[in-house]
């Protein structure tokens, strides 16, 4: 049984997630802590709750989702896992940091690559990797079928969708990903997005103005 904990971090108001199991092991998804107080809060939350991070994943590698990768990797000896199509995005991130004037500690390179359909199993729980490109070329979502929730990254938001005008983005590919990979899930599936409040697949199918028909 997993508990989802969300922090909202950095100038982009990015959602960083911890998935915590009953043994207090957790997986970190999209470590976005940037400012010193955010980094401190992140470390303190994990320490004070007696959590043991066992995994470090990225839905994709835009800079707002990777600011804390190095800190997490270093602190808990974690190895990063991303989809291979995100490697160029990860490589380009420090350059964007300079461009936006938000320099950051570069992420460690990935130790392993994720693939579509892969099951990430730890303890009694598992997550399914769903490739959903369009916002970025190797965007993945992490779907927990047993508990009906999905960490959707910047693909699908509450009544909105990810932008598709960044390098490697494509609006048609993004819409196809949402329709063919996310809207096929049950209406009751809880969606935890990379920005903004949580939602459900059913709510978005009804009310999302960007995905029609
Ligand atoms: Zn993004
Ligand atoms: Zn983002």
Image (cartoon, helix red, strand yellow):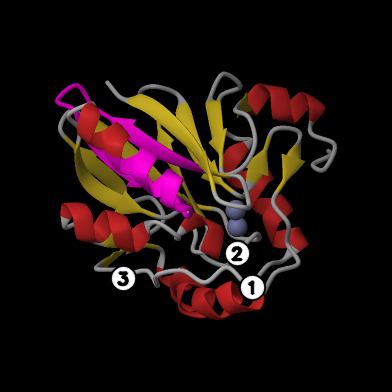
Q: Which is closer to the viewer, label 3 or label 2?
A: 3
Tell me the residue that label 2 is attached to.
136
Tell me the residue that label 3 is attached to.
108
**Any part of residue 145 in sight:** no
Q: In this picture, is 96 found above or below 140?
A: below
- Cα distance between the residues tagged 3 and 2: 19 Å
**Residue at position x 59%, y 39% from top?**
182
- Residue 192: give x, y in percent of width and height: 53, 33
Quarter of the picture containing the N terminus is top left
Tell me the residue that label 1 is attached to.
168
**Ligand 1 placement by image quarter:** bottom right
- Residue 15: give x, y in percent of width and height: 52, 41
- Residue 195: give x, y in percent of width and height: 62, 42
- Cα distance between the residues tagged 2 and 1: 5 Å
Residues at marks 2 and 1 touching, judged by CB atoms closer than 8 Å: yes
Closer to the camera in the image, 179 or 138: 138
Closer to the camera in the image, 79 or 39: 39
Q: Earlier in the sequence, mark 2 or mark 1?
A: 2
Q: Which mark is residue 205?
A: none
**Residue at position x 37%, y 39% from top?**
41
Q: From which residue to which does the magenta span run?
A: 15-43
């Amino acid at each position: 049984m997993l508990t989802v904990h969300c922090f909202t971090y950095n100038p982009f108001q990015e959602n960083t997630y911890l998935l915590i199991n009953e043994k207090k092991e957790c997986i970190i998804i999209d470590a976005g802590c940037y400012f010193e107080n955010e980094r401190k809060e992140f470390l303190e939350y994990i320490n004070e709750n007696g959590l043991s991070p066992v995994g470090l994943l990225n839905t994709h590698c835009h800079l707002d989702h990777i600011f804390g990768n190095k800190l997490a990797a270093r602190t808990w000896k974690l190895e990063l896992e991303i989809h291979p199509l995100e490697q160029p995005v990860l490589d380009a991130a420090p350059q964007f940091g300079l461009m936006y004037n938000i320099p950051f500690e570069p992420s460690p390179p990935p130790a392993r690559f994720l693939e579509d359909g892969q099951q990430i199993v730890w303890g009694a729980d598992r997550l399914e990797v769903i490739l959903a490109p369009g916002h970025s070329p190797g965007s993945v979502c992490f779907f927990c079928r047993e508990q009906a929730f999905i960490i959707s990254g910047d693909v699908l938001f509450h009544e909105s969708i990810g932008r598709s005008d960044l390098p490697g983005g494509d609006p048609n590919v993004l819409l196809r990903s949402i329709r063919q990979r996310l809207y096929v899930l049950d209406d009751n599936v809880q969606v935890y997005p990379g920005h903004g409040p949580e939602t459900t697949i059913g709510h978005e199918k009804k009310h999302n103005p960007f995905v029609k028909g």
